[in-house]
């Protein structure tokens, strides 16, 4: 169980590693290539200094609205695949924690629990799409997400192919037979379950499913296909952020996929300011990759983000104590964020945007 004396999200990592199979730990923790970008995410966030103001007044609250969703703080649960790898209840338990915390769950298309089952847990669902090679299957998946009550669609753009994740290759990693891509399967085993020496079965499976030829024209089709708020995730270059705004996206997520795609891409927080400068107030900007505490949320907002996505620490908490563990992790994040706001002299979220920052070096 998650210890009640956990004082930071980072402290959950050791406990999760002790209860997970080594190959599962490597799957959730690893990055692509030499993991340069994975490390850079933390290094760059740690290098962001925030100049506190004084005599700012008493904190009034952390509530906000993103993608039309009222939320208790500017944090959403990042899309993470196959959560039943770390806990039997998987994404349903994560949704229960998100509902308790009052934050949305960005549900992966590769969820190991069906979207309908997850939606019944009570959290607001933002459904994350990978672009499937078969347009018919993609349309069916979108309709299924809409019918389940999803409040937004989020398209991940940075996986035309899966990055070469060497930990998975060395482990010949494959899914256990009881963990499925519940939204994309009829219940039968797939190539994701067939281990081959020196290969990642996950990579083999996604290469069969995903459409690497995704284009801006395809996104224009999607924008016309759905009335839901639309976010585009995986943007680092301001020119792509501009195209997203021109296309009609409601939000962009500045993300390098947690260091799991192009190894050598910049840290997400390093790219944030350029994207914010380009799109201004024309769409919401969220930050993903490397968030580990309340101070990181403050850093992101001070640099112009409207909110952040929290990923791996919630998997650690889920592995240790299911929904209760993930809920406590989100409450700890809220405590840290409120303290950071107070110490920075910010009585509300609007005041964060007036803070000065310095960014040290980061890839």
Image: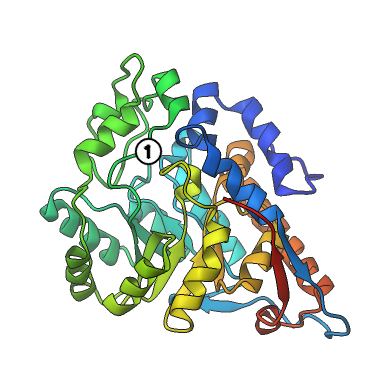
Q: Residue at x 65, y 57 (%)?
A: 330
Nearest the camera: 258 or 324?
Answer: 258
- Residue 326 seen by the camera: yes
Position of residue 76 in the picture relative to residue 198 (left or right) = right
Q: Residue furthest front?
A: 361
Q: Residue furthest right?
A: 55
Residue 328 at x, y percent in the picture: 68, 52
Q: Residue at x 63, y 33 (%)?
A: 16
Position of residue 314 in the picture relative to residue 129 (left or right) = right
Position of residue 182 in the picture relative to residue 58 (left or right) = left
Residue 271 at x, y percent in the picture: 52, 62
The quarter of the picture where residue 351 lies is bottom right
The quarter of the picture where residue 99 lies is bottom right
The quarter of the picture where residue 61 lies is bottom right
Q: Residues within 10 Å of mark 1 (few under 14, many from 20)?
A: some
* Location of mark 1 (residue): 163
Q: Residue at x 53, y 56 (%)?
A: 268
User: Is residue 193 positioned above or below 212 on the image?
Assistant: above
Nearest the camera: 133 or 34?
Answer: 34
Which image quarter holds the N terminus? Answer: top right
Residue 290 at x, y percent in the picture: 59, 51
Element at label 1: loop
User: Is residue 72 positioned above or below 260 on the image?
Assistant: below
- Residue 229 seen by the camera: no
Q: Residue furthest top?
A: 197
């Amino acid at each position: 169980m998650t210890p009640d004396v956990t004082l930071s999200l980072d402290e959950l990592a050791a406990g999760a590693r002790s209860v997970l199979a080594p190959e599962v730990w490597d799957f959730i923790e690893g990055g692509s290539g030499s993991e340069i970008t994975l490390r850079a995410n933390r290094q760059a966030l740690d290098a962001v200094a925030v100049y506190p103001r004084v005599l700012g007044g008493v904190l009034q609250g952390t509530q906000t609205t993103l993608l039309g969703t009222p939320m208790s703080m500017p944090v959403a649960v990042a899309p993470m695949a196959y959560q039943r790898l770390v806990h039997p209840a998987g994404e349903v338990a994560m949704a229960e924690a998100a509902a308790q915390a009052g934050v949305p769950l960005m549900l992966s298309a590769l969820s190991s629990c069906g979207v309908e089952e997850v939606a019944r847990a009570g959290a607001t669902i933002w459904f994350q799409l990978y672009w499937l090679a078969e347009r018919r299957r993609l349309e069916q998946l979108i309709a299924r997400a809409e019918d389940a009550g999803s409040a937004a669609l989020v398209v991940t753009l940075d996986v035309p192919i899966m990055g070469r994740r060497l930990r998975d290759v060395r482990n010949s990693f494959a899914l256990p037979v009881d963990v499925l891509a519940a939204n994309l399967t009829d219940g039968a085993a797939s190539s994701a379950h067939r281990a081959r020496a020196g290969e990642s079965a996950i990579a083999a499976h996604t290469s069969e499913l995903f459409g690497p030829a995704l284009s801006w024209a395809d996104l224009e089709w999607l924008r016309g296909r759905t009335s839901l708020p639309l976010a585009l995730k995986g943007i680092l270059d301001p020119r792509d952020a501009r195209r997203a705004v021109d296309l009609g996206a409601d939000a962009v997520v500045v993300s390098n996929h947690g260091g799991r795609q192009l190894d050598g891409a910049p840290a997400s927080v390093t790219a944030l300011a350029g994207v914010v400068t380009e799109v201004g107030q024309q769409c919401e900007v969220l930050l993903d990759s490397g968030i580990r505490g309340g101070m990181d949320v403050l850093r992101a907002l001070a640099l112009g983000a409207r909110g952040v996505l929290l990923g791996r620490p919630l998997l650690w908490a889920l592995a240790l104590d299911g929904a209760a563990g993930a809920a406590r992790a989100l409450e700890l994040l809220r405590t840290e964020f409120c303290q950071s706001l107070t110490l920075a002299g910010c009585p509300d979220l609007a005041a964060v945007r007036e803070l000065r920052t310095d960014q040290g070096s980061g890839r």
